[in-house]
Image (tube, rainbow, N blue to C red):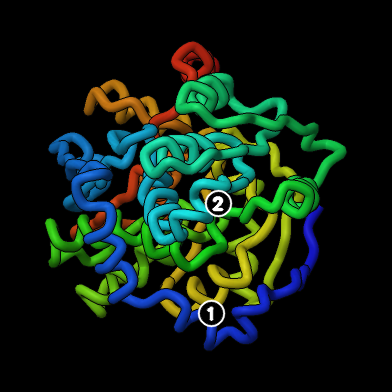
Amino acid sequence: MSAEVRPPLPVSIASGKEAIRAVTFVDIQRAAERIAGVAHRTPVMRSRQLDARAGGSVFLKCENLQRTGAFKFRGAYNALSLLSPARRARGVLTFSSGNHAQAVALAGRLTGTPATIIMPEDAPSVKMEATAGYGAKIITYDRRTTVREDLAKRISEERDLPIIPPYDHPHIVAGQGTAGLELLQSEPDLDVLLVCCGGGGLLSGCAIAAKGIRPGIRVIGVEPEVGDDATRSFKSGVLQTVKDPDTIADGARTPYLGSITFPLVMQYVDDMVTVPDSALIDAMRFVWQRMKLIIEPTGALALAALLSGAVEADGARVGVLVSGGNVDILTAARMMDAS
């Protein structure tokens, strides 16, 4: 089920141009300074076999090796560190299927900020257990009957807790963009950058960072085939939505791009493509077997576009954001065995 949607804009973002100004290259540079020494500067990995299969030179930015196992820690720590000490002491609220939940939980522990996390009942157990392990309080909901944003708004008002959303927040976008900044600092002559897309925080942040270093680089976002709201939004220029897409890429089940991320994607991203779940499993299998790296289905989105032919390398130097590695090993093994 899909449709056009125009969710209300935050009061601080009255137009597309204001949203674009909400996050700049300088903001990402400052976020990088803020998280330095706290977030990992993750490695860029190469593989001759990967280059041969892709038909180009491929550089994997391994955010599966980031703290909490995903890029989300960057934005969460940046956002919480910018709160006042009094606000941090009172706590924050967020909603997430897993990676942002873990990120806010750990960032909260490091900054002395109590974290309450709204998570779907069917969130991957490995992510829910890790979130609890970092000390967060978890509130579960049934995704079939509850809209998480509505639940978050109610709890926020009842408990006077500010919401730190998973992607539609300028400090989150700036923090996520530091992953792209690091990759382009390491490999400044990349021709193409592939980034997975859920709500667009990582994609828009990395696109701003990449264009700030190399204006001519092509930035391409990648979504699951059945969760193609951002791709349709990009192609049509009108914000689209999708309802709870049935994909193994649980981090990309977001209903639509945000009022901040949508205009940023339109401004800085060059193209959007989609891939089926079968391509995610193939990319996971390749990286697990050939490169000995554990990545999750959402983390495989960008690479899957390259390996499946949705994006052709054609001898180019291609940067790939591997966004995370939080996956239940037995579940992933069954996926690969069944494919």
Q: Is residue 264 above or below residue 37?
A: below
Q: Residue 299 vs residue 314: left or right? A: right
Q: Residues within 10 Å of mark 1 (few under 14, many from 20)?
A: many
Q: Is residue 128 above or below residue 207?
A: above
Q: Quadrant of residue 12?
A: bottom right
At a point 69% along the width and 26% down the height, the residue shown is 122
Q: In whole angstroms, how far apart are the C-alphas of marks 2 and 1?
A: 17 Å
Where residue 286 appears, as percent x and y from the top left, is 32, 29
| Disc number for residue 19 | 1
Q: Residue 132 vs residue 290: left or right? A: right
Tags 2 and 1 touching, CB below 8 Å = no
Where residue 40 appears, as percent x and y from the top left, is 23, 42
Q: Quadrant of residue 232?
A: bottom right
User: Which amino acid does the dot numbered 1 rest on?
Assistant: Ala
Quickly name the residue at label 2.
Answer: 166
User: Which amino acid does the dot numbered 2 rest on?
Assistant: Pro
